[in-house]
């Protein structure tokens, strides 16, 4: 079975500062990795995904993430955050073979302070 | 292209009642997954349907059931509601059921059980 640990439940950061949201996963098999964002009263929107290839993945809204197989991590980064980035961020994994569901972390609430 | 729609958006029920939630996937998408989101447990997978067949089921009691119609629209039903069923229920659709397929989420149905 797969599991995901998001190490920080809340991350406050000042506007225009960089941010890193941490995600570690556990799996005995190869997985695909995803980051989703959820704005208040909305569903989840895919920010980026790692399926294979380059370990540095670029997504929407200026976010990027790096897959580190040896450390089983997939941390999300943004060099300069905006007020509009305030939201809940979820890391998720899915086994890359067969048909298995997404497994989500508990989420990290990013609060951008003006 | 219209996104995933869920109806109703808000629902209030009392213990012991039953409820039916509806999800219309993006046109052409054949896979529909359901998730329960609560502050304590986070996002948990309920079930997935593909071409009217349940492909996967999460660890929820039999009170939770679902189905998918020939037009890919899906419904989930919760019978004998309990207070702990209060949650945001999210539906997600994808083209196929394979793990690399992006899941597109609807805005959710907020269920409150009194």
Image (cartoon, rainbow, N blue to C red):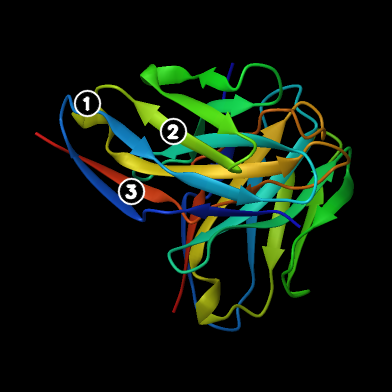
Say which element carries label 1.
Answer: loop
Report the front residue among B2 and B94.
B94
* Residue assigned mark 1: A82
Q: Nearer the viewer, residue B10 or A105?
A: A105
Q: Residue, x 24% and y 22% (percent of image)?
A: A80
Q: Residue at x 65, y 43 (%)?
A: A93
Seen from this angle, which residue lies furthest bottom? B16
**Tag nearer the camera, 2 or 3:** 2
For disc 3, the marked residue is A109
- What x and y, as percent, mark residue A104? 58, 50
Q: Nearer the viewer, mark 1 or mark 2?
A: 2
Which residue is rendered at x = 63% and y = 16% of the image? A54
CA distance for labels 1 and 2: 15 Å
Q: Which residue is tagged 2?
A: A76
Q: Is residue A3 above or below residue A43?
A: below
- Mark 3 is surrounded, within 10 Å at the Cα level, by few (under 14), some (14 to 19) or many (20 or more) other residues, namely some
Residue B33 vertical placement versus B86 (above, below): above
Image coords of residue B18 (percent x, y): 64, 72
């Amino acid at each position: 079975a797969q599991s995901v640990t998001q190490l920080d439940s809340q991350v406050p950061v000042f506007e225009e500062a960089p941010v890193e949201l941490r995600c570690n996963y556990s799996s005995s098999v190869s997985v695909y990795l995803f980051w989703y964002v959820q704005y208040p009263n909305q569903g989840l929107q895919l920010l980026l995904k790692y399926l294979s290839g380059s370990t540095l993945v670029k997504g929407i809204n200026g976010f990027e993430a790096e897959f580190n197989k040896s450390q089983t991590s997939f941390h999300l980064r943004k060099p300069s955050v905006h007020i509009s980035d305030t939201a809940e961020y979820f890391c998720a994994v899915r086994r890359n073979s067969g048909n298995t569901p997404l497994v989500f972390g508990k989420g990290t609430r990013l609060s951008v302070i003006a | 292209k219209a996104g995933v729609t869920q109806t109703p958006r808000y629902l209030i029920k009392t213990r012991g009642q039953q409820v039916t939630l509806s999800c219309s996937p993006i046109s052409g998408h054949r896979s529909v997954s359901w998730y329960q989101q609560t502050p304590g447990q986070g996002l948990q997978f309920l079930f997935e349907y593909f071409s009217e067949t349940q492909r996967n089921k999460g660890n929820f009691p039999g009170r939770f059931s679902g189905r998918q119609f020939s037009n890919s629209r899906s419904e989930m039903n919760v019978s004998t509601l309990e207070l702990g069923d209060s949650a945001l229920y999210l539906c997600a659709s994808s083209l196929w059921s394979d793990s690399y397929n992006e899941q597109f989420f609807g805005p959710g149905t907020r269920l409150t059980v009194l």
